Amino acid sequence: MLKRREMKILETPRLIIRGWELNDADDLFDYAQSDQVGPNAGWLPHKDVEESRRIIQMFRADAHTYALVLKAENRVIGSIGLHKRKPDEPDWSFFRKQMELGFALSYKYWGQGIVPEAVKEILRFAFEELKLDEIYCGHFDFNAQSKRVIEKTGFTYDHTLTKKIETLNNEERTIIFYKMSRKDYYRIKREEAN
C-alpha cells in the first residue's frame, strides 16, 4: 500500500482527487456541517471548523482518504476513500486484499454524476495499481443516493447487516453491502469498451 508521503494524485474530467491539506478545513466544514451529508455517510454533522481540521488530521494519517476538488471551482466538495475495514461476515476471506470504499459529497452537488466519476477512478486505481482483489461498499438502507451510485458503478449485492454505529452515538442502522472483485472490474471495463 502507498504511504502517506507517496499519496498519488488522481484526476477525472471534472475532479482532482488528492490528499487532504489542513487549509481544506473551511471547505470540509461547508459541507460536513449539513445534516444531509454526515448522517447519510455514518458520522454526525461537524460543529465548527476546528472539528473539520481535526478530521483532516485523521484523514492525513490514512494513505487512501482523498479530497474531491472540483476543478471548475478549485474547492473541496467531498471525500472518497479506501479503508481497511471489513464487514462483519464470516465468509469474507482475510487472505484476499480487500478494502471498503466510502464517499461523501456536498449536497449542493448531488445529482450531477460527480461521485460515480470519482468512484470509477478510485476503482481503476484500486484494481489496476494497488492490485486489490475485492472492494466492498455499503449504504444505510434509507440512503437512496448512495445506493444509486453503488449500483451504477457496477457493484453487486452481497449482504445486509444491522449494527450500532459508534460515530452516530451508537444508533442502530441497517447497512446494505455490495462488492466488486478484480474479475468483475475487468469484465465491466471490457463491456464499456465495446
Image: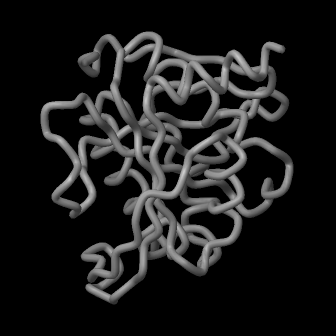
Residue 163 place in picture, x, y as percent: 28, 80
Nearest to the observer: residue 144 or residue 78:
144
Q: Is residue 59 above or below residue 18?
A: below
Q: Position of residue 113 (x, y in %)?
A: 81, 44
Q: Is residue 73 left or right of residue 51?
A: right
Question: Horizontal and vertical percent for residue 15?
Answer: 71, 27
Nearer to the camera, 94 or 116: 94
Disc tally is 0
**Left or right, residue 121 beside residue 190:** left
Quadrant in the picture for residue 144: bottom right
Q: Is residue 152 left or right of residue 20?
A: right
| Residue at image location 22% in from the left, 61% down from the top | 89
> Which colour scheme appears in the figure?
one colour
Quarter of the view holding residue 117: top right
**Residue at horizontal 61%, vertical 49%?**
27
Q: Report the quarter where the N terminus lies.
A: top left
Residue 126, position in %: x, y?
Answer: 44, 23
Q: Nearer the viewer, residue 83 or 136?
A: 136
Q: Nearer the viewer, residue 181 or 136?
A: 181
Considering only vertical position in the picture, is 172 above or below 111? below
Say which quadrant the C terminus sits in: top right
State left or right for residue 119 relative to residue 96: right
At horizontal 42% and vertical 80% (from top left) the residue drawn is 174
Q: Quadrant of residue 22?
A: top left
What residue is drawn where x is 51% and y is 57%?
Answer: 157
